[in-house]
Image (cartoon, rainbow, N blue to C red):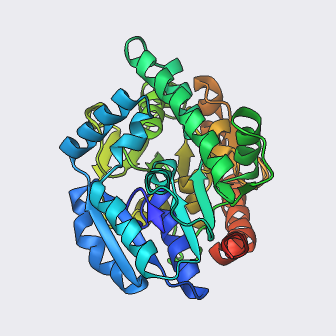
Amino acid sequence: MITHRIPYPPDKGDKIRSYNQLVFLRQNGWRIHLCTFIDDPEDLRHIVSLKPLCESASFHHIGPVRRAVGMASALVRGQALSVGAFYHPKALAYVRRVWANHPVKAIFCFSSPTAAYLFKAGKIAPNCRKVMDLIDVDSDKWRQYALQRRPPQSWVYRREAARLAAYEKRIAETFDATLLVSAQEAAFFRRQVVDSARVHALPNGVDTAFFHPRTSEKDPVDDNTCSLVFCGMMDYAPNVDAVVWFANEVMPRLRQKLGAMWFDIVGARPTREVQALGKMADVKVHGRVADVRPFVWNAAISIAPIRIARGIQNKVLEAMAMGRPVVASEQAFEGIEAVPGRDLLVEKAEPTAFCDAITNLWKNRTLSADLGRQARALTEKRYGWDARLAPLQTLLS
């Protein structure tokens, strides 16, 4: 199993998915040799938590210098920069060593940069199953970034989109199965990259035991203040775009309609642009927290004003599992198997529409409570990880 980022702790989208896949495979009889990368020094302390789940494990720190060197090499070779960013020669040596010394039955790669280790290893693993989890269509994400930037940044992003699309096509033609996070994402990949029967949807789940409704009978939500929450990694461009757009474009309208309000932004590594939002009197930027659940429980509404998106938004599923009413953009809703108006509210990422949805939900407490109950019931019924990941066992065998 090769993952582009250490699959622990499960506190952000890709780590949530890869960690639950690792646990699922271990519980279903697989002996796992894990090759993974650490780009955040904070994650070095989590190595000890993963080793008991693996037969062997190899962790490779990719700091800014190594990342820059890898990207420069990729630029010279005409490759995608993100592929070069996750290259480490010791990781390649580990992959070759495991293949040479163990009866490997399957290779599972998580995120497109990890495919490079099979490509660079030459004729490695000709007789075992090779499965790639792309999660979402990264090439299109870079295309969306390019549309929102000016030259020269937009030129770099367009180049990355084109190189990644070609790379994703090579992956789909080489691996026995290529996975995407939703049926919509898989269909998009077939239309835009390569139409192949080996492209499959493997949707995300949610840990409904951990993300549960509050246990106290008293609702701590202040009846006089509309409190909102957004959770996510705050150095991730789509999340940064979402909260900056919401604070600057939607909140002024909400203040006019509601008067008192409050917005909590919860997530590690907030950029300067995000931190600047904390200067507003009714916005609090919390950064990394030990547990996001109290912030979601204590909010009247969880919001997901995502404008750049591919795949499934775990933040939406987690809030729904906690029984909180959610207002999501159409982009954030993509791939979630729910009914708008019954399980959550879905609106265009347009200031007036988003403002009106939040205002109406805040003033209609019956609707708010109903949405929370329906959301929880839906996640319990359809989003358990074991059921979601069951096809993975077949695809790897």
Looking at the rendering, which quadrant does residue 144 occupy? top right
Q: Is residue 377 above or below residue 274?
A: below
User: What residue is at 75 percent from the left and 55 percent from the top?
Assistant: 198
* Number of numbered discs on residues: 0
Residue sitting farthest toward the top: 151
Of 84 and 42, the residue lying toward us: 84
Closer to the camera, 338 or 9?
9
Residue that appears at 57% across and 25% down: 351
Q: Is 320 on the left-hand or right-hand side of 260? A: right
For the question of whether residue 234 can be seen, the reply is yes
Point out residue 317 in the picture as x, y percentages from the top left corner. 61, 59
In this view, the residue in front, 172 or 17, is 172
Residue 193 falls in image quadrant: top right
* Location of residue 210 with respect to 6 vertically, above or below: below
Q: Is residue 81 above or below residue 224?
A: above
Q: Position of residue 363 (x, y in %)?
A: 63, 44
Residue extending furthest left?
65
